[in-house]
Image: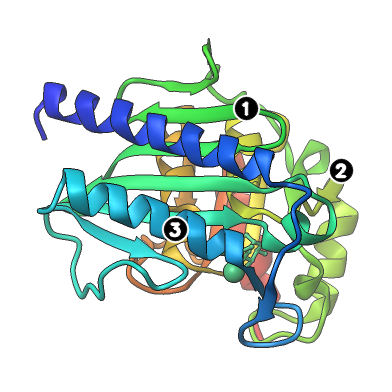
């Protein structure tokens, strides 16, 4: 993708993300229609749907040749990542949006032939925009993010993960994960995968381990984390399939091998 083309798409995407965020902030106390999807804790609101529909309408008008993958289904059904593909989570952290009215983000990753070129994660209520373009560094608003400190040991690491790792699961014995959380300095659960990626990039966490994430949860985060020298793979250290759900490990490079080893030890 030519640099000028990418810059134009980036500026446009950024404008739409900020516009969508401002709309959500304005409506934050308005009544919501809340539905459930796969189970009673899998929430979706009219705001999730309206926000995704806003992006899809804008993209289709402005860039009819681009494709879209979105959580709420307004995008395209794709079986490949050819050309320019927008991967959108209109509200990442819907449960937080509903219950806390904070700690949620708009996440937009823009890929070209399968390569992440642009990542935008907007922490809407904090008005913090994490953004990156491939090979151009990552930023929080106007501040350039520093490369991650590559001297962290597991015992000093703060790792984002949720309680599912401590329940009976098909990846590892729960004892392994109990051992894991006892080994690391601390575990954190923010309830928005996109924000966990952003916090890793910011250097306030050292890793994030998730059992199953969709492409829209991680597309922007991968681009941003790459730019500070972090790495994102599945929990065996392999590349992710951006058209499917994956178990995901994103972390400081110096911890990757150790975390993968820990999980391997606990395999059933
Ligand atoms: C969810 C959040 C959450 C993660 C879930 C995701 P949503 O996204 O990122 O932190 O644990 O797996 O589905 O549904 O709020 O966009
Ligand atoms: Ca959801
Ligand atoms: Ca999500
Ligand atoms: Ca969502």
| Element type where label 3 sits in the image | helix
Q: Which percent across, then down, holds residue 255?
A: 62, 43
First along the sequence among labels 3 and 2: 3
Q: Residue at x 18, y 69 (%)?
A: 80
Q: Residue furthest top?
A: 143
Give the number of the disc on residue 52.
Answer: 3
Q: Which percent across, then down, holds residue 202?
A: 63, 27
- Is 146 on the left or on the right of 85, as rendered? right
| Element type where label 2 sits in the image | loop
Near mark 3 (Cα within 10 A), the count class, few <14, some 14-19 or many ≥20, is many
Q: Which percent across, then down, holds residue 58?
A: 29, 47
Q: Is mark 2 within 8 Å of ligand 1?
A: no
Q: Is mark 3 within 8 Å of ligand 4?
A: no
Instruction: From this view, report whether residue 94 is shown above or below residue 83.
Output: below
> Would residue 183 be seen by someone viewing this image from the given angle?
yes
Eye-nearest disc, 3 or 1: 3
Q: For this rendering, which residue is in front, 194 or 184?
A: 194
Q: Which percent across, then down, holds residue 206?
A: 68, 39
The quadrant where ligand 1 appears is bottom right
Give the number of the disc on residue 185.
Answer: 2
Give the number of the disc on residue 257.
Answer: none
Q: Residue at x 46, y 73 (%)?
A: 245
Q: For this rendering, which residue is in front, 101 or 151?
A: 101
Residue 98, picture quadrant? bottom right
- Is 95 on the left or on the right of 242, as rendered? right
| Element type where label 1 sits in the image | strand
First along the sequence among labels 3 and 1: 3
Quadrant into which the N terminus falls: top left
Q: CA distance from mark 3 to mark 1?
A: 20 Å
Give the number of the disc on residue 128.
Answer: 1
């Amino acid at each position: 993708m030519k640099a000028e083309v990418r810059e134009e798409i980036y500026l446009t995407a950024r404008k739409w993300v900020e516009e969508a965020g401002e709309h959500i902030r304005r409506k934050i106390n308005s009544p919501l229609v809340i539905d459930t999807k796969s189970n009673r804790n899998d929430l979706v609101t009219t705001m999730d749907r309206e926000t995704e529909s806003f992006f899809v309408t804008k993209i289709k008008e402005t860039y009819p040749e681009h494709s879209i993958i979105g959580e709420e289904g307004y995008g395209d059904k794709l079986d490949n990542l050819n050309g320019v593909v927008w991967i959108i989570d209109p509200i990442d952290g819907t449960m937080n949006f509903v219950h806390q009215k904070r700690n949620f983000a708009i996440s937009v990753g823009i890929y070209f032939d399968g390569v992440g070129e642009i990542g935008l994660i907007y922490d809407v209520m904090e008005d913090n925009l994490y953004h990156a373009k491939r090979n151009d560094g990552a930023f929080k608003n106007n501040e350039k993010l520093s490369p991650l400190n590559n001297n962290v040991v597991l015992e000093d690491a703060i790792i984002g993960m949720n309680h599912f790792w401590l329940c009976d699961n098909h990846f590892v014995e729960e004892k392994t994960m109990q051992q894991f959380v006892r080994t690391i300095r601390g575990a954190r659960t923010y309830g928005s995968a996109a924000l966990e990626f952003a916090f890793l990039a910011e250097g306030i966490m050292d890793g994030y381990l998730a059992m199953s994430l969709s492409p829209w949860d991680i597309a922007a985060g991968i681009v941003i984390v790459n730019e500070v020298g972090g790495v994102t793979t599945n929990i065996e250290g392999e590349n992710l399939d951006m058209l499917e759900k994956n178990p995901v490990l994103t972390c400081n490079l110096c911890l990757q091998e150790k975390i993968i080893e820990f999980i391997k030890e606990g395999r059933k």
